[in-house]
Image: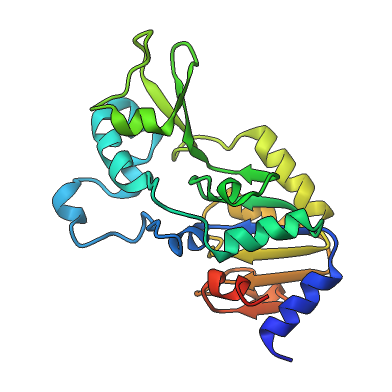
């Protein structure tokens, strides 16, 4: 049986699908994985991405953090691709119960998905560290240097930086959804980022489908492995 046909069969026979996705879902919308360092990288930044995107760096080098953040982490021109759109459709059809994503771009919601657990937060939300006032992403983009609140406080993106814990409510919701799923589709992630990747271990259902261009640590547990771009795959089911 063809792999796409097999995936179609699994989806059709499932009632509680959960999708667990990573950066590979967004790269097809034109959002680069920040780990894929471009040729100009070393000319523009003196630190690796993991260092810049840490809580320590944010607090000690806030201006440099925002220079990188605006240039590499915000991509407002990106639009949902076939993977985002198909997942939203499956939710509307009552097939998919939740999306658990490591991405921070808000593209799942832009495609129409409602039950989305954002493990690493979202660039679309920003808060003053002093008074907790909300600011949208356009405010960050249009500000210079360190964005400040009208109260004078520094504004921080609602994203989980290195050294920071995941949000307990988001994690609890994600675990609950995964543990009740009958099918888990893992896509666009090599499952190397913890603690997020560890959540897939809570799955107790029938089918594990992995759609990824490179091997993952869960490959041996998969009922179906597809090593193709996820947008292409979802456009065919």
Q: Which colouring convention does the figure follow?
A: rainbow
Question: Which quadrant: the N terminus?
Answer: bottom right
- Please tell me which residue lies in front, 95 or 158: 95
Q: Quadrant of residue 51?
A: top left
Q: Quadrant of residue 42?
A: bottom left
Name the residue located 31 percent from the left edge and 40 percent from the top edge: 70
| Number of callouts | 0
Q: Is residue 222 left or right of residue 226?
A: right
Name the residue located 18 percent from the left edge and 57 percent from the top edge: 40
Name the residue located 28 percent from the left edge and 45 percent from the top edge: 71
* Residue closest to the far bottom: 1
Q: Is residue 176 above or below residue 158?
A: below
User: Residue 64, image x and y in percent?
Assistant: 24, 34
Q: Look at the image and tell me whether residue 19 can be seen.
A: no
User: Residue 121, image x and y in percent?
Assistant: 53, 39
Q: Look at the image and tell me whether residue 84 can be seen.
A: yes
User: Residue 63, image x and y in percent?
Assistant: 24, 29
Q: Is residue 121 above or below residue 62?
A: below
Question: Which quadrant: the C terminus?
Answer: bottom right
* Residue closest to the far left: 43
* Residue closest to the far top: 151
Name the residue located 55 percent from the left edge and 35 percent from the top edge: 165
- Please tell me which residue lies in front, 59 or 109: 109
User: Residue 208, image x and y in percent?
Assistant: 73, 69
Q: Is residue 101 left or right of residue 171?
A: left
Q: Is residue 129 left or right of residue 191?
A: left
Q: Quadrant of residue 162?
A: top left
């Amino acid at each position: 049986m063809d792999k796409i046909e097999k995936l179609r069969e699994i989806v059709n026979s499932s009632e509680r699908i959960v999708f667990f996705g990573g950066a590979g879902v967004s790269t097809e919308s034109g959002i680069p994985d920040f780990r894929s360092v471009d040729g100009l990288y070393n000319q523009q930044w003196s630190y690796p991405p993991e260092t810049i995107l840490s809580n320590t760096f944010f607090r000690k080098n806030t201006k440099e953090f925002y220079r990188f953040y605006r240039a590499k982490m915000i991509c407002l021109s990106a639009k949902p691709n076939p993977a985002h759109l198909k997942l939203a459709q499956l939710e509307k059809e009552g097939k998919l119960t939740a999306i658990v994503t490591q991405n921070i771009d808000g593209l799942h919601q832009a495609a129409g998905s409602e039950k989305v657990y954002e493990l690493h937060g979202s660039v679309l939300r920003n808060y003053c560290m002093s008074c907790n006032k909300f600011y949208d992403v356009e405010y960050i983009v249009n500000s210079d240097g360190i964005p400040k609140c009208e109260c004078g406080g520094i504004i921080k993106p609602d994203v989980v930086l290195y050294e920071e814990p995941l949000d307990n409510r988001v994690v609890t919701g994600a675990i609950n959804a995964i543990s009740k799923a009958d099918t888990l589709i893992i896509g666009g992630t090599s499952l190397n980022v913890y603690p997020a990747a560890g959540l897939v271990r809570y799955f107790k259902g029938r089918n594990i489908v992995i759609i990824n261009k490179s091997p993952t640590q869960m490959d041996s547990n998969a009922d179906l492995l597809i090593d193709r771009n996820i947008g292409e795959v979802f456009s065919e089911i």
